[in-house]
Amino acid sequence: MLGRLAGAAIVLCGAAAVAHADRIVRIKVTDITKTDRNTVLAIAGFEEGSVITELDLEKVKQRLLASGLFKEVKVSLENAPGGVNLLISAKDKISWFILPTFAYSEDNYGGGLAFGETNLFGRHKRLLLYAALSNTTGTLLAAYQDPALGGSWFYWQLDGHYQWDKVREYFPMRIEHPWLLRTMPLQVGGGGLNAGVRWWRKFKTEGRFGVRQASFEEAKFHDAAWDGLAEYNSSWGNWRDSARAQGRASASDPNGTNLYARGTIGWDGRSSVHGVQDGLTLLGSYEGGFGAFAYWKAWINFHWALKIRKEHNFMVRAYAGISRDVPFFEEFESGGSGLRGYLTRQFRGDTRGFASVEYVFPIVKLWGLHIRGLAFYDTNLSWFSQPPDCRPESDGGPRCRDGYPYAERISDGGKHVRYYLPGQYFSLKLEAFNMGVGAGLRFYLKAIAMPLIGVDYGYGIEGGGWGQVYLTVGMPL
């Protein structure tokens, strides 16, 4: 008994010694070639005169690595008169890049060019200029971000974008070998300002105010798919001609300027070091639109990453959102890299639930190149929960007064009309639930603060076929 008590006393004394707090007399920062010393101290979270223990050293190291600015970090203490000196050795990553980008999947492929600086002026400011063109979209983007205004907990971002898009709408009732019924060309341009506070580093409140100008072009109906609808409903094949005769080939929403305000609050404690993630993110957001488009939408993001044996990751992601009277370009979309195993943006809705489980593991490290493998399971549920204002009598009616042969949603006192396609779900159905499984690879360069290559193979359980391959170069998958 006495032996056990003595052993416990030794352990407690040892723990007390390790946790002993000392005053920091001086902080010595070495090996940095670009990053400003004050930026290093702000990220580390300690200053001269504060107290530190041996237990804090790993925390400082992980903070510096998670910033994405440094490829190697060493932290230690040395005795000094009146306390200790904090020694930080940090080797900068290459912070700027001019990077060609490329993305490929069965129905969406293209490339672009990105210029970025992740450590502008050596003060962790970020700048991104990006241009890309694919078979369905064209994008121009410019953004400036200050993640710590004056070394404080305040952060802000200013951005502007222009996107030319061909939005594809698929027949909702056919998941395997989906039929493309309509393509909606549109252009959206605008920008916005984000500002927020990271309370105690990980809890954040954020606001955004933005503006978007949207313009639509004449929609394209894909005849072969429409002709095949007769096998589901004998009258659906004629609806395309009826819609054209009434001018319904025009955009689902008229042109206009959309102003919006968004608020976000929650815990943002996830970090990433050389592709290995750790921590929890749980954020709730609400957005209200006004001006030409009056709407609201709310959503929750969840992401939990568990680091196992230093290099392995078990990750769970979830998303839930609902909206009302949103313009066409603000509807929830899923499919592609966001729901692997299906076509890009195959599913649409004003309500969405998504969940994904991934296990990521190291394969090999070669001269700073980290190759990692992953296995995943994705699930998604998308549908329109907002009832339409009119629909065919055979579907419960009342029939649309303007003669449109399927369902419509009328918003803003009749200013905007959403013309739904045949077979659209307006209640929760099992057919709206889809799952995908698969595996992939990720390639990271330790010296660059950007992922290099990502490739995934996904098999859609409801989609069947041979599955889908997704490849990206120079951007996250």
Image: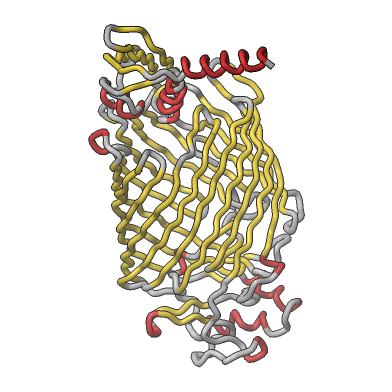
Q: Residue 452, percent across and down?
A: 52, 31
Q: Nearer the viewer, residue 279 or 240?
A: 279
Q: Residue at x 59, y 79 (%)?
A: 240
* Image location (x, y in percent) of residue 312: 63, 30
Please name whichever residue, 77 or 141, is drawn nearer the observer in this view of the structure: 77
Residue extending furthest front?
2
Who is closer to the viewer here, 66 or 384? 66
Residue 106 can be seen in this image: no
Task: Name the image quarter holding the C terminus.
Answer: top right
Residue 66 vs residue 276: left or right?
left
Q: Quadrant of residue 447?
A: top left
Provide residue 181's location: percent of width, then percent of height.
61, 69
Who's the residue at 56% across and 43% down the image?
304
Q: Residue at x 45, y 20 (%)?
A: 19
Q: How is the image coloured?
A: secondary structure
Residue at the (59%, 32%) spot, across then down: 307
Residue 91 found in image quarter:
top left
